[in-house]
Image (cartoon, rainbow, N blue to C red):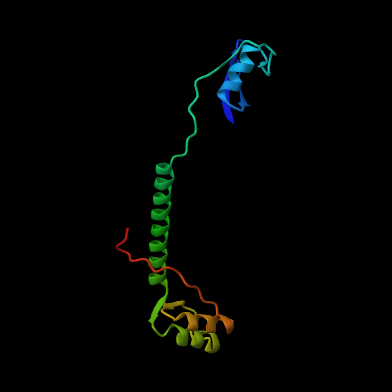
Amino acid sequence: MIKYNLICKCQKVFESWFISSAEYESLKKKKLINCIYCNSTNVKKTIMAPNISSKSNKAAKKIIFEKKIKKELINFRKFIEKNCRNVGDNLAREARSLYYDKKSLKGIYGKATPEETAELIDEGIDIATIPWIDKSEN
């Protein structure tokens, strides 16, 4: 399928779809293409730019998207480091202490194994795993 922008002698522009450019030419010769505004068969194609999506465009968009995500993750890391306490490898123990003893209202961050994370979730303790992007990767 191909879409053409068409213009009539009445100077109105409209678009229409055709199976191929050859079909457009065949229908035009038979005067079967009519203006949707005045019904004239005096219609011709206008200049138009095709919308071609190339692999390089897709690759460029992917790179831009990845950079944007990386920047957001770096900003997220900076926010966490500014507003939460780093408990290092003691995350599971400290999370339980906060949850059961209600010690502090300040958030914490650190490292936990996948097993420790699963246990905390099973206990009903809210925990999230996020990619920890190096701040120098910008």
**Residue 124, position in %: x, y?**
59, 81
Report the residue at 47% width, 35% height from top: 52
**Camera-side residue of 109 and 4:** 4
**Residue 86, position in %: x, y?**
38, 78
**Camera-side residue of 36 and 99:** 36
Q: Quadrant of residue 108?
A: bottom left
Q: Is residue 130 above or below residue 50?
A: below
Q: Is residue 1 left or right of residue 104?
A: right
Instruction: Report the label total.
Output: 0
Which quadrant would the C terminus be assigned to in this image?
A: bottom left
Q: Is residue 72 above or below residue 85?
A: above
Report the residue at 29% width, 63% height from top: 136
Which quadrant would the N terminus be assigned to in this image?
A: top right
Q: Is residue 124 left or right of residue 110?
A: right
Q: Is residue 35 above or below residue 92?
A: above
**Residue 102, position in %: x, y?**
53, 86
**Camera-side residue of 43 and 31:** 31
Q: Quadrant of residue 72?
A: bottom left
